[in-house]
Image (spheres, rainbow, N blue to C red):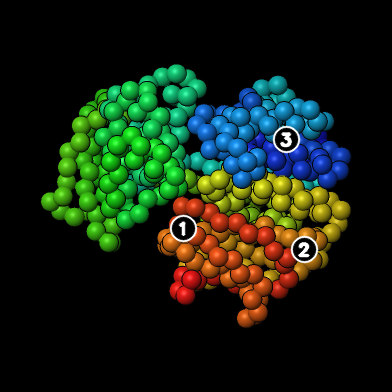
C-alpha cells in the first residue's frame, strides 16, 4: 500500500474541484492534491460542447470544455499534484482517503483537510417507476450526450424525452441538429424543470413540443424500444385514465433529475440534508465532520457552472482556515429556509466564521415575475434585494456578512 500525505485533498476534478484546488494553492496551502477517477480533468464539462458557460464569471459565452480548459491550464501551470485514473474507495472521519489506481495500486492518503467535489449523477428509469420491458434505447440524457458529442454515435433515430431538466432540453436541440426526430418533451410537473433560456433556445426555436403534466407510463419493445405510452397526470401526479397516447420511437431519453454523489459522505458519517440530498454545510462550507468540506453538485444540484466554481473556492477558503486552526471553536446558528424558499446552502453559520462575506445559494418554491429577497436575524432585516423572473429551476446567490441565526425569505406580495 502506497502512503501519501497532503495538506488539502480535493476529490473530483470537475468545475468545483478545479476551482477549489486552485484557490487552496492561491491561499498558500503548501501541498494540494487533486484526485480524479477519470483519465483527464474537467469532469462532465468535457462533453458539454454547447455554449452558455462562464457568462457570470468571464462575461462571455464559452462551451463547457472551454470553461474547464481555463482552469485546467492553471492547474497544469501550478505545482498542484494530480492523480487521474484514481478511484476513491473510502474517506474516514480522521481525514484519510483510501483509493486505488492502475499505476499505484492501493493508496492511503493522510490529509489535513478534504474537499468533496464528486458532483452528481442522473436518475434512471428504475427510479421513476416506468413499467414495461427493458429494451435497448432507454438512456439518460447524459449518456446520450456522451455518445453523440464524444463517441460520435447516434443512439437512435426517433426520440421521446422524459423530463424537462436542462440537459434533456439541450440534448433535444443537439439530437435535432444531428438528424434525430424529437417527438416531444414530457414533463410530469405543471411547469418546466429547466432554465427559461433553454426552453426558448432548445425547444421553441426548433418547434419541439413540450407537454406539461404528462409522463411516460410504459415502454414497449423486446430488443429495442418500439414505442412508449404517454399519459396526462392530475394535480396529485397520478395518471388520468383515458388520456394515454402511444408514441412510436426507438429512443427514450431520461432527464428526470440529478442526485448528489454522496456514497463516500455517508460512509464517513457526514450528516445529509433531506432537501438538497447533499451534506449539511456551515458558513465555511465544512460538513458535520471537522476538516471535511463540500462544494458544487455534491452539496446541492446547481444550474450554473459559475456558481459551482464559486462554491469550490468558498470550500477552499474554509479548508485553508481549518489548517490554520481558525475553525476549532464549536457552535453554530441555523439558516432557515423561510417563506417561498425550498432550501438554502450553507445551512448553518459558524459562530467563529472566517472574516469576509459568506456566499449563499437558494432555490424558490414557485415562479414569480417579481419578488423580494429578505434576510433577517431575530426580526432585524440585514439584507433586502429585488429579484425579477425567479423560478424553481434557477438558483439564486447572494453574499453577506454572517452573525447569528438567519431567516431567508422570498416575498412575492407588495413587490
Q: Residue at x 33, y 23 (%)?
A: 179
The disc at residue 353 is: 2
Which quadrant of the view contains residue 330?
bottom right
Identify residue for label 3.
34
Q: Is residue 112 left or right of residue 279?
A: right
Given contact means CB atoms under 8 Å apart, are the residues at marks 3 and 2 in contact? no
Quarter of the picture containing the N terminus is top right
Residue most extreme to the left: 242
Residue 264 drawn at (x, y percent): 61, 45
- Residue 379 vertical position relative to residue 410 in the rendered view, above or below: below
Above-or-below relation of 290 to 136: below
From the viewer's perspective, is the residue at label 1 or at label 2 nearer?
1
**Alpha-carbon span between mark 3 and mark 2:** 26 Å
Q: Earlier in the sequence, mark 1 or mark 2?
A: 2
Residue 9 as seen in the image, left or right of residue 147? right
For the residues marked 3 and 1, what is the alpha-carbon distance in whole angstroms?
38 Å
Query: Who comes first in sequence, dot 3 or dot 1?
Result: 3
The residue located at (55%, 48%) in the rendering is: 302
Q: Nearer the viewer, residue 93 or 378?
A: 378
CA gap, disc 1 and disc 2: 32 Å
Res 408 seen here:
no
Give SS at disc 2: loop
Looking at the rendered structure, which numbered label has been put on residue 389? 1
Q: Position of residue 103 (x, y in %)?
A: 70, 21
Q: Mark 3 Cα within 10 Å, few/some/many (few <14, many 20+)?
A: many
Amino acid at each position: 500500500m502506497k502512503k501519501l500525505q497532503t495538506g488539502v485533498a480535493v476529490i473530483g476534478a470537475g468545475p468545483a474541484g478545479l476551482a477549489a484546488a486552485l484557490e487552496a494553492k492561491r491561499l498558500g496551502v503548501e501541498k494540494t492534491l487533486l484526485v480524479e477517477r477519470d483519465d483527464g480533468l474537467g469532469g462532465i464539462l468535457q462533453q458539454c460542447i454547447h455554449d452558455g458557460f462562464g457568462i457570470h464569471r468571464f462575461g462571455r459565452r464559452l462551451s463547457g470544455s472551454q470553461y474547464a480548459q481555463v482552469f485546467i491550464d492553471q492547474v497544469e501551470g501550478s505545482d498542484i499534484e494530480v492523480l487521474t485514473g484514481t478511484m476513491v474507495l473510502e474517506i474516514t472521519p480522521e481525514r484519510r482517503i483510501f483509493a486505488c489506481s492502475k499505476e499505484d495500486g492501493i493508496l492511503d492518503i493522510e490529509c489535513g483537510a478534504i474537499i468533496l467535489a464528486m458532483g452528481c449523477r442522473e436518475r434512471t428509469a428504475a427510479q421513476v417507476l416506468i413499467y414495461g420491458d427493458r429494451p435497448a434505447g432507454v438512456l439518460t440524457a447524459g449518456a446520450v450526450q456522451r455518445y453523440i458529442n464524444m463517441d460520435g454515435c447516434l443512439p437512435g433515430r426517433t426520440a421521446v424525452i422524459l423530463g424537462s431538466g436542462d440537459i434533456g432540453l439541450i440534448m433535444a436541440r443537439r439530437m435535432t441538429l444531428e438528424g434525430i426526430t424529437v417527438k416531444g418533451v414530457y414533463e410530469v410537473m405543471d411547469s418546466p424543470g429547466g432554465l427559461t433560456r433553454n426552453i426558448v433556445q432548445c425547444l421553441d426555436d426548433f418547434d419541439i413540443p413540450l407537454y406539461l403534466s404528462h409522463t411516460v407510463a410504459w415502454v414497449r419493445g423486446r430488443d429495442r424500444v418500439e414505442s412508449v405510452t404517454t399519459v396526462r397526470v392530475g394535480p396529485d401526479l397520478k395518471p388520468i385514465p383515458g388520456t394515454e397516447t402511444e408514441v412510436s420511437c426507438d429512443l427514450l431519453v431520461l432527464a428526470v433529475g440529478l442526485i448528489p454523489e454522496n456514497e463516500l459522505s455517508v460512509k464517513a458519517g457526514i450528516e445529509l440534508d433531506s432537501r438538497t440530498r447533499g451534506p449539511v454545510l456551515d458558513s465555511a462550507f465544512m460538513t458535520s465532520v471537522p476538516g471535511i468540506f463540500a462544494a458544487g453538485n455534491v452539496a446541492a444540484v446547481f444550474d450554473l457552472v459559475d456558481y459551482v466554481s464559486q462554491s469550490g473556492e468558498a470550500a477552499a477558503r474554509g479548508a485553508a482556515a481549518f489548517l490554520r486552526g481558525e475553525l476549532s471553536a464549536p457552535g453554530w446558528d441555523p439558516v432557515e429556509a423561510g417563506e417561498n424558499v425550498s432550501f438554502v446552502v450553507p445551512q448553518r453559520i459558524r459562530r467563529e466564521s472566517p472574516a469576509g462575506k459568506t456566499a449563499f445559494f437558494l432555490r424558490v418554491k414557485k415562479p414569480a415575475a417579481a419578488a423580494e429577497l429578505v434576510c433577517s436575524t431575530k426580526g432585524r432585516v440585514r439584507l433586502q434585494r429585488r429579484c425579477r423572473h425567479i423560478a424553481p429551476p434557477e438558483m439564486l446567490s447572494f453574499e453577506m456578512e454572517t452573525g447569528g441565526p438567519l431567516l431567508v425569505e422570498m416575498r412575492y406580495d407588495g413587490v
